[in-house]
Amino acid sequence: MNDTKLHLIGKPRRRVDGRAKVTGQTKFADDIMLPRMLHCKLLRSSVPHARIVRIDATRALAHPGVHLALTGKDFKVPYGILPVSQDEYPLEPTHVRFVGDPVAAVIARDELTAFEALDLIEVEYEPLRTFSTPEESLEHEDPRIHEYGNQGNIHKAVSLGFGDVEKAFAGADEVFEDTFFYQGNTHLAIEQHAAVAAKDPDGKLVLWSSTQVPHYVHRALARALEMRAAHIRVVAMPNGGGFGGKCDPFNHEIVVCKAALLLDRPVKICLTREEVFYCHRGRHPVLMRFKTGVKRDGTITGVHLKTVLDGGAYGSYGVVSTFYTGALQTLTYHIPTYKFEGCRVFTNKPPCGPKRGHGTPQGRFGQEVQLDKIAEKLAIDPAELRLRIVEKPDTLTANYLQVSTTGLAECIRRVVAASDWRNRFRKLPRGRGLGLACSSYMSGAGLPIYYNEMPHSGVQLKLDRSGGVAAFCGATEIGQGSDDVLVGCVAEILGIDPMDIRSVTGDTDLTPVDLGSYSSRVTLMMGNAAIQAAERAREFLAEGVSRKLEVPKGRLVFAERRVFDAEDPAKGVSFSEAVCLAEAIFGTLGTTGSYTPPKAVARFKGSGAGPSPTYSYSAAVVEVEVNASTGWIQVTRVWIAHDIGRALNPTLARGQVEGSVYMGLGEALMEEQEFRRLPKRLSHALVHKFPSILEYKSPTALDMPEVITELVEHPDPSGPFGAKEVGQGPLLPVMPAVANAVYDAIGVRIDEVPITPEKIIKALEAKAAGKPARYGPAHFPDVPWPETLQVPPPWEGGDGKAINAPPRPSKELARKSHAPEVVQS
Amino acid sequence: MTEQAHITLKVNNEPVEVSFAPYKTLLEVLREDLNLCGTKHGCELGECGACAVLLDDLPVLSCLVLAVECDGRRVTTIEGLVTDGRLHPLQEAFADLGAAQCGYCTPGFLITAKALLDEHSHPTRDQIREALAGNLCRCTGYQQIFEAVEAAIQSGAAGVEVERGPRSAGQEEA
């Protein structure tokens, strides 16, 4: 498809839901008000780790205005997002694992009454040892936070080897070893999670929720409520921001469903901001050690990466997150041998999970900062070094990821030119600096969360005699513009205006499946499904018009709400007439389209995380000013180039890039999920240090620098109209680029995020005292790694399978599941 | 039940009488008792700016205002920015230029931006930044919001009066 044939795609325009959003008419979950609706509040554990000895809600139930009180005994079946981690209960019956873990629920006539009644619930806890850090969890096998996982409090430990890294290090001119720490942070979507459940008039269950994954919530509800899935309808309301924070099925969603079923009345819950901090599922704190061998010219001989993830109290996506800390390292630069070891431990803190970039920013931070150090030692410009070693297109990486198109080199050249890098890097006055970093990300996970061979996304179209078209898809609008992509693709193929199309999305009863708004999958997968459905519709219409006009189908053009002869544009019919002609021949018109990603090449256990139909690439240059006496860091400008394949709607694409830069700067400079021990006299509990928006610092309009965005567009054969992802990839280079810029400005290495003034001052003090000019971790804990799964890379004759026997599967939950262990996000 | 409070106020230029539990904030009364759900909440502690409305033409965080304090006063919400079926130039610019992604913080931004333009007809980029610094947006990175405010100024947003007299029928939005 060439540009000249496209009428809509690639041109900036108002998104289809733009009017609704600026008039406040977009309906979010908490905007649903139903007659006879009751309100739910959850009682959350006040202790970080304990057995529940006794729980009694009798007094709460007797409170005036209270209709129902629920506790753990009302739910028999655990659930969880991954088949291998079904470790949560809607209300925990016996064992609380963090401050904030829900143990009881009250449903009352209004929120205040429910809230008052929570105080009347009596809970007796028997405290257990609390684990606040991965080191503590690794050190003590007992008590176990969960009765499953590799061993003790290790949830998951993996070891994968692609070629012989020790030999690669022996053959290197220089070997670098660095330890980095990436602090955890949270999504902070401005919309607090809300859900409303009701029995519909037929007696079936409906849940309206702020979820990114209605399909997975549907499955979790059927399981946890032991109900027929066909009698449950999940409607994903537009999300007031997601960023991965609404990708798990949540306690509150299941609790309001149960309550609505029992009471036969609508039940609503809207979490407080504090509770949203407890739901979390945000960025894992990751400690990592990078060992990299290089030749004098910068060629990498091998990389050995070890990561330890602080998982918090539940599994969530954690098994996948663990693999993601090491999966995508090989996409940007050629790495001939690679070893990755990752370990996720449980701690008594809110569960970590998928936040924008899922598991990838941490490893990417270490890799890009270490490359900056390597470039300096080898006296090669960091941009030049990267250009020498970028991975080539149409390459299978050491860990069997298929790179198809890559615009990374062009991204680097663009930001280097735009920032005047060659004249300014290492040449700015002290206190000012530039830093560069790159990255790559998936355009959709190649595997679903539960193993199956069905499509990942489906679109149905209904064509009306009026000329209107309805487009149905399970995709969820979380602000990223998925409705606009759906409508835009259909409008382009059918030659009509986006406003002629009604989109119906995110409804498990009405729309064909889409797996959800995660892993940057929607544009590519839903977009391809939409194109297929629209092309099938166009075929019907072309037949009708061709017969009427006596023009061969191949000569018909669909544009400007008309279907006409390419050789005689005056000869044609209106779009609505085309529908009527086709309907007279074929009956009422409806088509379907679906998309299933190509099968991954890799066949080893653990290969489920990483494969994608195609990968986006980004490069960023960040400019900073650092005050040496206060440590204050001001980011003054960011240049970012993103290989998007094709921008379907450049206005939205630019917004995704700038929003990613913004979120990356927050992570780089200020955002952190911190915990503290209360004083001994106040229970000594491990509590969230600041579960409020005021104290959890995020960048404001005053903090945000100018961002210069360049979209690199070379259409990718697997994407709709050539599009790749844009929602997550551009976040990844920002944090390491800031760290590298700080070094350029002031000559100290901050090997962890967030990079705060305090850490800069400490690094400057270390430098002044003759110690290494850095701030960051030195120690990496001892981890009982499993036997390394040996997978020879393609260039050593490998076929994607491991050559040694896979390690014994862990007992417990994994054995109960028939699904393969490695799943995707 | 608690005894109800009762007030009379003008919301979006329409006189309104409302009874509600006296502990309720203006935010809660707008959303729950007057069904004006365009005003959002992100923290209910005055931290995020999502609940901004105009109270006697000045921007306030409605989560920090008790509704009983609003007797006899004028409130403008996002629903009041559309006049005679026409979007306010700020709304047009926000929709056209990508300033609304998820749309959740958008009503608060629009109200705050309107208050800014009511006070300064041609604010600089720095004045816009400053005025909007109390509204958090997690989607956009703010840049397209600044650009939309500037574009709205170019199209004459500063002169637009939202609380006009009787509406004439038949006018459509641009």
Image (cartoon, coloured by chain):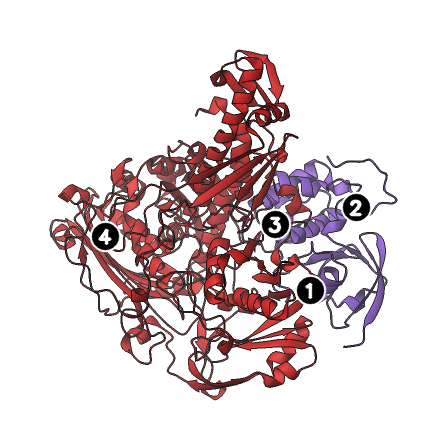
Of the numbered discs in the image, which one, if any, rests on residue B162?
Answer: 2
Name the secondary structure under disc 1.
helix
Q: Dot 4: within a 10 Å radius of its alpha carbon, few (fewer than 14), some, or many (20 or more) residues?
A: many
In the rendered structure, which amino acid carries the disc numbered 4? Phe
For the residues labelled 4 and 3, the Cα–Cα distance comes to 43 Å
Left or right, A572 with respect to A420, comes to right
Dot 2: chain letter: B
Q: Nearer the viewer, mark 2 or mark 4?
A: 4
Q: In the depicted view, which residue is nearer to us: A379 or A523?
A: A523
Above/below status of A149 relative to A581: below
Of the numbered discs in the image, which one, if any, rests on residue B63?
Answer: 1
Q: If the image is split into quadrants, where does the N terminus of chain B sit?
A: bottom right
Q: If the image is split into quadrants, where does the C terminus of chain B sit?
A: top right
* Mark closest to the chain's N terminus, 2 or 1: 1
Name the secondary structure under disc 4.
loop
For the residues labelled 3 and 1, the Cα–Cα distance comes to 19 Å
* Residue B93 horizontal/vertical position (percent): 65, 40
Of the numbered discs in the image, which one, if any, rests on residue B103?
Answer: 3
Name the residue rendered at 80%, 36% in the picture.
B171
Q: Nearer the viewer, mark 1 or mark 4?
A: 4
Q: Nearer the viewer, mark 3 or mark 1?
A: 3
Q: Is residue A272 visible?
A: no
Q: Dot 3: within a 10 Å radius of its alpha carbon, few (fewer than 14), some, or many (20 or more) residues?
A: many
In the rendered structure, which amino acid carries the disc numbered 1? Cys
